[in-house]
Amino acid sequence: MRKIIIVVAIVLTVMCGGLGWVAYQWIGLGVELNRSSLTREQFDAQKEGTAQSRVLAALPAPLTDITDKDLYPGDPGRKGAPAGASCVYYGISPVTEDGPELWRFCFVDGKLAEKSAVTIGAAR
């Protein structure tokens, strides 16, 4: 009987730890998305041709957990991103049900070469 109680205690401990980790990850994602979100006005204020350092200085830190490989698996063209560009992504504030989910800013040779709205479902 004692062995069963120990096994049950270990299983419950592992399950609680796993659920706590999942909750921590969800909360962290929400915090990052909130900190890294832009309004339409902030997006529109950034003009193509502006220096990358100036664009990034005017905006909060971009999302860190999203990569081109995540958004565009098997699409080397990255849905129209300029060739050789490095892109950063921001959440959209306020979130709408039928609109895009992310703002994308792509830089080539230290200048903003392209900015667009990205719908994650359409990217896959």
Image (tube, helix red, strand yellow):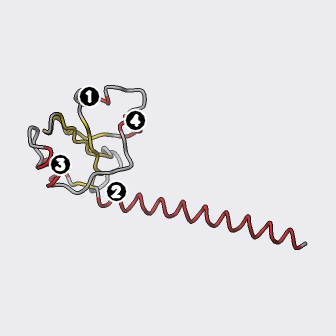
Q: Secondary structure at mark 2?
A: helix
What's the CA distance linking mark 2 and mark 3? 16 Å
| Mark before the other along the chain sequence, 2 or 3 | 2
What's the CA distance linking mark 2 and mark 1? 24 Å
What's the CA distance linking mark 1 and mark 4? 14 Å
Instruction: Please name the amino acid that badge 2 sits on.
Output: Leu
Local packing at callout 4 (Cα closer than 10 Å; few below 14, some 14-19, many 20+) is few
| Mark before the other along the chain sequence, 4 or 2 | 2
What's the CA distance linking mark 3 and mark 1? 18 Å
> Which residue is disc 2 drawn over?
33
Instruction: Please name the amino acid that badge 3 sits on.
Output: Phe
> Which residue is disc 4 drawn over?
69
Residue 28 spot, x, y in % from top left: 42, 61
| Mark before the other along the chain sequence, 2 or 1 | 2
Q: Secondary structure at mark 4?
A: helix
> Which residue is disc 1 drawn over?
80
Res. 50 image quadrant: top left
> Which residue is disc 3 drawn over?
43
Q: Are marks 2 and 1 in contact (CB under 8 Å)?
A: no
Residue 59 spot, x, y in % from top left: 18, 55
Above or below: residue 60 compared with residue 123: below
